[in-house]
Image (cartoon, rainbow, N blue to C red):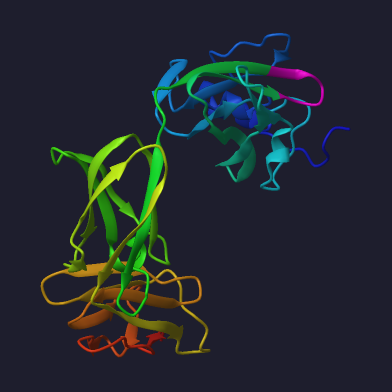
Amino acid sequence: MQHANTKRLPAFLCAIAGATLLAGCGGGGGASSTATGLTGGWVTVLTPSDSGTYSSNCNAITLGGKAFISQTWYRCCSGDASDTGVTVSWKNLVTGSSGTAHQTPHYCLLIGTTYLCDHSWDATIALTLGDNIFEVTAIDPGGAGGTDTITVSKTENSWTVSGTLTSYEGTGLDIYRSGVGVNLKDESGSLLIGTSGAGVSGQFTLSCITTGNYLLEPTAAPFDHSFAPPWYAISVADSDVTGYDFKSVAYSASGSISYATNGDPVTGIEVEITDGSATFSRFLLQDGSYNYVVPAGSYTITPVPFGGYTFTPQSRSVDLSAGSQSDLDFIYNTQ
């Protein structure tokens, strides 16, 4: 059954929008893909390449692209991929493996009318050594659809390198709270993977690493974390390697910002922390909190003024020479 509550761009708005918006006017649009056995639709592979061939030594790859919106099975605007009326799937013609892609409908606004104007898809797929021929198909319940293909050549086997970046207290040093990551260099010192950030727990994983000898070292900006050890010389051969852990003398400075009127958490406000020579800033989390993990030392924390309103206090000075500090809170004065 056709979706109820359908909404594409009305005919008179399509005329106004012109050719550049025709994909949102009830048609599938145009693409270079084929429609083998299928008519009335299309799909394209644009990532990692739109040329039809690509080489990688990774164990998996993310394919992505665009697909048509069904002329008769669309709806608007729930935010779900089913709005497109189209299902995108993939198959590795060499191995026989297959699956369904993740789909994202895109909405546009013209003269006060929201309409379904575009549609993208993506899928992360395992690779086998040699050529992997992927056929991507987009089809609606009425049989309209199209296909596109890409050949991904996995050139050699690869593995992962993993470890942690933490303080001596065990707090994770991640890219968001600390600006900390890791670099991987080859034996000549050439950078292969730069500033791959760690997660909240401080764990990091570097992928697509082929057999060889490397230098793994932490990196941090804007503050100069001192890590122990300062680097690892590592060897990768025939298996994943883990346990490359780095530690730093670092402490947490955390707090929150709430409205003066009702105590509710504030969001969308940027908070800066500075040691007088370098400054690091991030936006508040959804619960109105912030948390920095920085080297031992003295800092000033300042919310960035927004909309002409003020904060109480305007800033906070904190000494992180001996330990973490919490409850470094601010009040957002909207009057």
Question: Does 124 appear above or below 132?
Answer: below
Q: Nearer the viewer, residue 298 or 78?
A: 298
Q: Position of residue 274 (x, y in %)?
A: 19, 75
Q: Splitting the image into 4 quarters, where does residue 223 fall?
A: bottom left
**What is the residue that sits farthest to the right in this orientation?**
1
Residue for point 20% across, 57% down: 231
Is residue 281 visible to us here?
yes
Drawn side of residue 257 relative to residue 151, left or right: left
Q: Quadrant of the C terminus?
A: bottom left
Q: Position of residue 292 (x, y in %)?
A: 32, 74
Question: Does 289 appear above or below 108?
Answer: below
Q: Nearer the viewer, residue 258 or 192?
A: 192
The total number of labels drawn is 0
Question: Does 207 appear above or below 311?
Answer: above
141 falls in the magenta region: yes
Q: Position of residue 271 (x, y in %)?
A: 32, 74
Residue for point 77% across, 38% down: 6
Residue range in magenta is 139-145
Q: Nearer the viewer, residue 239 or 286?
A: 239
Q: Nearer the viewer, residue 281 or 332?
A: 281
Q: Quadrant of the N terminus?
A: top right
215 falls in the magenta region: no
Residue for point 78% across, 30% down: 73
Is residue 27 visible to us here?
no
Q: Splitting the image into 4 quarters, where does residue 36 fall?
A: top right
**What is the residue that sits farthest to the left in this orientation?**
277
Drawn side of residue 327 relative to residue 71, left or right: left
Q: Position of residue 260 (x, y in %)?
A: 45, 89
**What is the residue that sits farthest to the front in this orientation?**
238
Residue for point 81% across, 26% down: 141
Drawn side of residue 84 relative to residue 58, left or right: right
Drawn side of residue 175 relative to residue 38, left or right: left
